[in-house]
Amino acid sequence: MRVILFMSEFRVIGADWCPYCIKVKNYMQQKNINFEWIDADTEEGGKIREAEKKKYNYNTIPMVFQNGKFIGGCDAYFASL
């Protein structure tokens, strides 16, 4: 059994080549929002992405979570502000 502890209010699964991921990442950095960035292109990040992708039936990145709850992608995140 794997337990994931959330150290930051926000967790973002994304990649540096994805413009929507970078939009979320840059916004959070500019607003000094504490978040955990999980790079989907790394081995560990890819495993996390695959698990979350299956769990939420969500195939695209970014995947944005707040306090462990899945919000959605870029549009859903900005709509939630």
Image: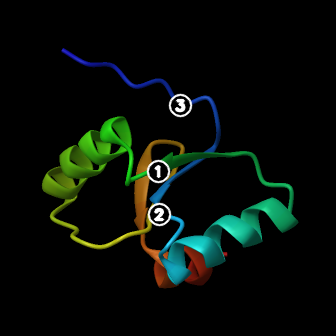
Q: Position of residue 66 (x, y in %)?
A: 54, 51
- Pick whichever of labels 1 and 3 is earlier in the sequence: 3
Residue at the spot of label 3: 6
Direction top: furthest residue? 1
First-in-chain label (2 vs 1): 2
**Closer to the observer: label 1 or label 3?**
1
Q: Is residue 32 left or right of residue 53?
A: right
Q: Which residue matches tag 2? A: 15
Q: Amino acid at mark 3?
A: Phe
In this picture, residue 46 sits left or right of residue 34:
left
Specify which label sits upstream in the sequence, 2 or 3: 3
Circle 1 packing at 10 Å, graded few (<14), some (14-19), many (20+), is: some
Instruction: Give the residue at x 38% y 45%.
Output: 42
Q: Which mark is residue 39?
A: 1
* Labels 2 & 1 near each other (Cβ < 8 A): yes
- Asked whether 60 or 1 is in front, the reply is 60
Residue 79's place in the image compared with 44, above or below, is: below
Residue type for callout 1 = Asp
Local secondary structure at mark 1: strand
Q: Position of residue 1 (x, y in %)?
A: 18, 14
Alpha carbons under labels 1 and 3: distance apart: 16 Å
Kindly identify the amino acid type of the residue bearing the numbered disc 2.
Ala
Q: Is residue 9 left or right of residue 73?
A: right
Picture quarter with the C terminus: bottom right
In the visual, does 74 lie left or right of 46?
right
Q: Position of residue 23 (x, y in %)?
A: 64, 78
Q: CA distance from mark 2 to mark 1?
A: 5 Å
Q: Does dot 2 land on a helix, a strand or a loop?
A: loop
Q: Nearer the viewer, mark 2 or mark 3?
A: 2
Q: Which residue is pictured at 86% across the width and 55% down the height?
A: 32
